Image (cartoon, rainbow, N blue to C red):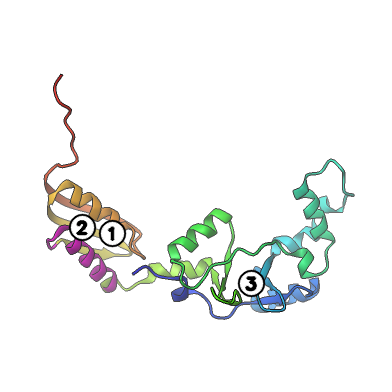
Amino acid sequence: MPIKVSDVMGRTAIAVRQDAGFADIVDVMRRYAVGAVTVIDLDRRPIGVVSQDDLLLKESDTMRHSISIFESAARRREHEKAAAVVAKNLMTSPAITVTPGMPVRDAARLMHDKKIEQLPVINPVTGRIAGILHRSDLLRVFDRPEAELRAEAEAVARDLTGTDVAIGVENGVVTLEGKVEHRSQAVRLIQAIRRLEGVIDVTSRLEHGSDDLLVIPPLL
């Protein structure tokens, strides 16, 4: 079974109300040593995120110039953030969230695509904040015990090939040795092992019988 967000997320979310002041947000970030805080509404639903980058706009020299009618909407929004003093005007919204049941692999892809460091975790029924997922939490999937990872890889090998493939695991790298009947079985097995949570890479020393992936066109 894929590792889910609920398996690695932090159960305590650092959040502020939308009327929290600039100084209060800075204090919270310092006190809990975080680079961003989730902004929630009165019903504890995430509505945005205030990051250190949002706060640092106030100190940027380029933000001290007056707003020009020729500026882009994004640049105008930066000016507004630089002048803001409460969370609802400082935050980036809407908040990008995940649920506890989402596979960690999907959450990691979302973080990478959106270039963000953390994701509020919400209750899928109420929409209320239930925890927080940091990039560092995602790295925990690579800390799986080698015996556990080997057992899962062996089960996959038996299902796909029907034979006992010798499997070694060291520092997250899985080594496959043995012989399978068809080349396609070896390819599918390598792909399936790569998808296992905690696998960093796969080294294959598999031999195969028939090459059922080789297509020879008929002679003209």
- Residue 91's spot in the image, x, y percent? 73, 64
Residue assigned mark 1 = 193
Residue assigned mark 2 = 176
Q: Quadrant of residue 111?
A: bottom right
Residue 151 shown left or right of residue 141 in the figure: left
Report helix, strand or loop for mark 2. strand
Contact flag, marks 1 and 2 (Cβ < 8 Å): yes
Disc 1 to disc 3, how far (Cα)? 35 Å
State which quarter of the image contains the N terminus: bottom left
Magenta region's main secondary structure?
Answer: helix
Which label sits in the foreground, 1 or 2?
1
Identify which residue is drawn at 71% across, 75% down: 41
Disc 2 to disc 3, how far (Cα)? 41 Å
Mark 3 nearby-residue class (10 Å; few <14, some 14–19, many ≥20): some
Identify which residue is drawn at 80% across, 71% down: 22
| Residue 162 among those drawn in magenta | yes
Q: How many marks?
A: 3
Disc number placed over residue 34 in the picture, else none: 3
Q: Decide if residue 30 is in sight here.
A: no
Contact flag, marks 1 and 3 (Cβ < 8 Å): no
Identify which residue is drawn at 19% across, 41% down: 213
Residue 1 vertical placement versus 186 (above, below): below
Disc 1 to disc 2, how far (Cα)? 10 Å
Residue furthest to the right in view is: 66
Viewer-nearest residue: 140 or 195: 195
- Residue 158's spot in the image, x, y percent? 17, 63
First to last magenta residue range: 148-164
Which label sits in the foreground, 1 or 3?
1
Residue type at tag 2: Leu
Viewer-nearest residue: 197 or 200: 197
Viewer-nearest residue: 42 or 81: 42
